[in-house]
Amino acid sequence: MYELAVVGGGVIGLAVAWRAASSGHRVTVFDPDQTRAASRVAGGMLAPVTEAWPGEEDVLALGEESLRRWPDFAARLAADGHDPALSTAGTVVAAFDRADADTLRTLAAYLHELGRDADYVAARQLRRSEPGLSGAVTGGLIVPGDLAVDTRLLLDSLRMAALAGGATLLSEEVLEAGESATVRTRAATRRFDAVVVSAGAWSGRLLPHLAQHIRPLKGEIMRLRARRTTLPPPTRTVRAMVEGEPVYLVPRAGGHDGDLVLGATQYEAGFDTAVTARGVRRLLDAAERVFPGIAEYEVVETAAGLRAGSADNLPLLGEVADGVYAATGHHRGGLLLAPVTADAVVAWLAGVPAPPGVAAAHPDRTKERV
């Protein structure tokens, strides 16, 4: 049994804490403000195929490995915490103009080369799948294997399950996660058998030798709600390219009936988490051109979060010092990669091989870029 410290209380940190506690380890989670976790404002897409792109085969392989683990992960979480509302409805990806269509055709051809299921179809067939799509949509992809989850139900369930498993959650800021598995807060310095740094965009402050390989990427989202007089939201995740601008609409099956999450801007702004008028305008303009009915939806919330980006879009997973492990840099895939990351940590502690695909994400690869 290990005395394990987990630094960070977002989806990765809580998933690690839950699975480690379930495996018999004594777990302490440090997080001064769980409301700042990027996963709280994430769309909830579990979509390695529609996130795929040529040259990122390791990213796709790790994502698909984690996607295979999601149904069991969700079922066990429902038993230990509560149901995170996993959706199996799939994804449609719409193209707005000819250039967007060419991009999606390139993606479809690449996925077919890898044996993945993603077909480019004409606009009429796409609208049969989602009738609320705009008549201006030129075509797109239907991807049946993608999943989605209600992010806030997921976080609440992970927290509940971790606590039920015996984990301790402390609202303390970690100032240093040093070698020999020490954790220093303003109150004290404590020694553990192992420390997992899963502090998202803030991880570079705790792992200085990796700081240049982890950068914050700001993303803004909106939560909308259908009204009695409006068209209902889509039945599955709708992603789109609108003149090169990506946008997604994710229905919230587990939350308020008719809720929809709209995202996502992405740009470098340091650690700024203010929602900007420009960001909201970009989201609404792109979304209305794809799914016009949302123009009459109620605006429930606007929010911004910071993803932890890496240079090659792979996370940083592995031991970086004696007893200190990185589990960060998940970029857009934090929710998707939670099961495989948690299983990797449990495997490291047990001294057994990590899941397939994890080795490619070891932080040692960053030495080649220094």
Image (cartoon, rainbow, N blue to C red):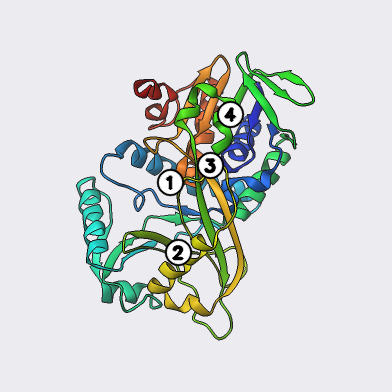
Q: Badge 3, how many Cα within 10 Å: few under 14, some, many 20+? A: few
The residue that disc 3 covers is: 270
Q: Which mark is residue 67?
A: 1
Labels 2 & 1 near each other (Cβ < 8 A): no
What is the spatial separation of the Cα atoms under label 4 and label 1, in whole angstroms? 30 Å
What is the spatial separation of the Cα atoms under label 1 and label 3, in whole angstroms? 30 Å
Element type where label 3 sits in the image:
loop
8 vs 295, nearest the viewer: 295
The residue that disc 4 covers is: 205
Q: Which mark is residue 150?
A: none
Total numbered labels: 4
What is the spatial separation of the Cα atoms under label 2 and label 1, in whole angstroms? 30 Å
- Image point 47% across, 57% down: which residue? 264
135 vs 304: above or below: below
Labels 4 & 1 near each other (Cβ < 8 A): no
Q: Position of residue 326 (x, y in %)?
A: 52, 27
Mark with earlier residue (2, 4):
4
Mark with earlier residue (3, 2):
3
Q: Position of residue 309 (x, y in %)?
A: 46, 39
267 vs 72, nearest the viewer: 267
The residue that disc 2 covers is: 282
Q: Position of residue 127 (x, y in %)?
A: 33, 75
Element type where label 2 sits in the image:
helix
- Image point 41% across, 67% down: which residue? 286
Q: Badge 4, how many Cα within 10 Å: few under 14, some, many 20+? A: some
- The amino acid type of the residue labelled 2 equals Arg
What is the spatial separation of the Cα atoms under label 2 and label 4, in whole angstroms? 31 Å
